[in-house]
Image (cartoon, grey):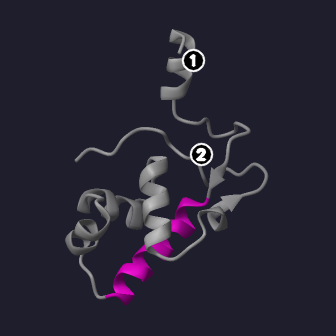
Amino acid sequence: MSEEMQERANRPFQKNSTSLQIDWKRFGDDLRKARAMRGLTYRQFGALTGVTFSTLARLESSYLPCNAETFMTLAVEMGRDPLAYAIRGKTGVSGGLAQETDAA
């Protein structure tokens, strides 16, 4: 892979790009409800999914984006179609799906 391609692959998606836009608020709300319905703490749900408790807390309360792998893992664990969180058209509320990795 060329250096330019590698650099582009490592960049987060831009807010107004043509990439998939995710409704992070809805995702965070659904994540909180799914975890609470199962009676699990952040740490318990994290142990089940492999996602750190701090990432779960951030997603549920701050509606910040996460990387694609974490997003897919959590959506599947909640029994949701990940495309249900896709936003059509431009929006100022939500950013694109981030590519960074979560800190452990």
* Identity, as a three-letter code, of the amino acid under mark 2: Gly
Q: Is residue 45 visible?
A: yes
Q: Which residues are magenta?
A: 23-38
Residue 54 placement: quadrant: bottom left
Determine the main secondary structure of the stretch shown in magenta: helix
In the image, residue 72 lies at what x, y percent? 49, 58
Residue occupying image coordinates x 40% and y 67%: 60
Residue occupying image coordinates x 41% and y 54%: 70
Residue 101 sits above or below residue 93 on the image = above
In the image, residue 88 lies at what x, y percent? 77, 56
The answer to if 37 sits in the magenta stretch is yes
Residue occupying image coordinates x 60% and y 60%: 23
In this view of the protein, which residue sits in the foreground, 50 or 42? Answer: 50
Q: Is residue 63 visible?
A: no
Question: What mark, if any, has residue 5 been given in the picture?
Answer: 1
Mark 2, residue position: 96
* Identity, as a three-letter code, of the amino acid under mark 1: Met
